[in-house]
Image (tube, rainbow, N blue to C red):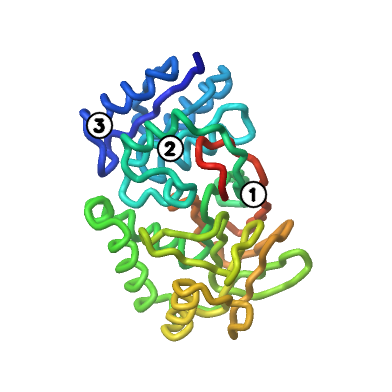
Amino acid sequence: MPTAILIANPSASQFTGGVFRDITAILSRTFELTTEWPISPHETETVARRAADRGIDVVFAMGGDGVAHHVANAVVHSDSALGLIPVGTTNVLARILGIPMKPLRAASHAIGFEPVPTRMVRIDATTPVGDMTRYAAFALGIGFDADVVESAETRPFSKTRFGSVHYASTAIGRLLSSWRSEQPNLRMICDGDRFDALAALTQVHDPYTYFGKLPLRLTSEPPTGVATLAADDLGVSRAAEIFARAAIGLSHRDATGIRLWTNYKRLDIEAEPRTPFQADGELLGYASHITVTPAEDALLVLRPQTD
């Protein structure tokens, strides 16, 4: 019988004791299952990493994108697969990878899924506390996007209750209050192409669905690898244009003041002053230098055989 561990976040918006017991019962039919309730992101990664080191077949993340992010970073480049049981607010990664949004259905389907090698993005950053290496499973935000995450996290009740609406309102507020007048502070070099930008967003998988069911696309055709969009200003008209193009699936390649890179090998970013950056909705800190490299097939995920 394959082995699995269920790492649960009881603070997730859709978590209940009854759902947890039902999930445990479903998974126990197929797996030799143990359960853990870590009390912090650090403990979540520690528990997941120890499970991978022991050769556990599947590490299930029962929670939202935060738990998924931390478990994924613990099991990346290992033989342990990530299983997703979405009980968070938006569940972006599960939605992108075709995991059912209902937790009981997700658990039932997971029994029949095979581990699929899945793309991530590696992030090497220079921060005030030292060098850092992290992985993003669905998105990396540099500048504005990370500032929105930081601001949204100051109101956790609104995040839990209103989800993507809370993030959207926070984004509009931050844009109107400060970012529309900011000047470019990022020197970006992607495979030899240079661009000065104010903010950038890297999409690991197409489409990007941070606003619930609304898909956002950086390219008119799904890219075969990662895609990064950079903008040199975030005035109201520019921000509205970016969002409108992403919502209706128009390419940004011909837009003024915007640079789009797809299927690249390496992206280097110098920030002066240091800029905030986030991965999968988790604020990682402030960095003066960031290197972004695609990590194809870095993570095994129990999911449908699509990308």
Residue 11, x across and y down, in percent: 27, 38
Residue 213 lies in what quarter of the image?
bottom left
Residue drawn at (44%, 86%) of the image: 237
From mark 1 to mark 2, how far is it between C-alphas? 26 Å
User: Which one is in front, 255 or 43?
Assistant: 255
Residue at x-position 47% and y-position 30%: 112
Q: Nearer the viewer, mark 3 or mark 1?
A: 3
Task: Give me the C-alpha separation between circle 3 and circle 1.
Answer: 37 Å
Q: Kindly identify which numbered label has been placed on residue 19.
A: 3
Check the image and report above or below for 296 versus 216: above
Q: Are marks 3 and 1 in contact (CB under 8 Å)?
A: no
| Nearer mark to the viewer, of 1 and 2 | 2
Residue at 63% of width from left, 48% of height from top?
122
Are there few (<14), some (14-19), or many (20+) residues within 10 Å of tag 3?
some
In this rendering, the answer to whether 173 lies above or below 212 is: below
Q: Nearer the viewer, residue 7 or 193?
A: 7
Indicate the secondary structure of the residue bearing disc 3: helix
Label 3 and label 2: CA atoms lie apart by: 14 Å
- Closer to the chain start, of discs 3 and 1, is 3
Front residue of 157 and 110: 110
Amino acid identity at mark 1 = Asp
Whole-percent x and y of residue 274? 55, 62
Residue 124 % position (x, y): 64, 49
How many residues crowd mark 2 within 10 Å: few (<14), some (14–19), many (20+)? many
Kind of residue sitting beneath label 3: Val
Residue appearing at x 27%, y 26% in the figure: 22
The residue under label 2 is which amino acid type?
Leu
Residue matched to label 1: 124
Which of the two discs, 1 and 2, labels the residue nearer the N terminus?
2
Image coordinates for residue 169, horizontal then vertical, percent: 30, 68
**Residue designated by label 2:** 84
Lateral position of residue 38 relative to residue 181, left or right: left
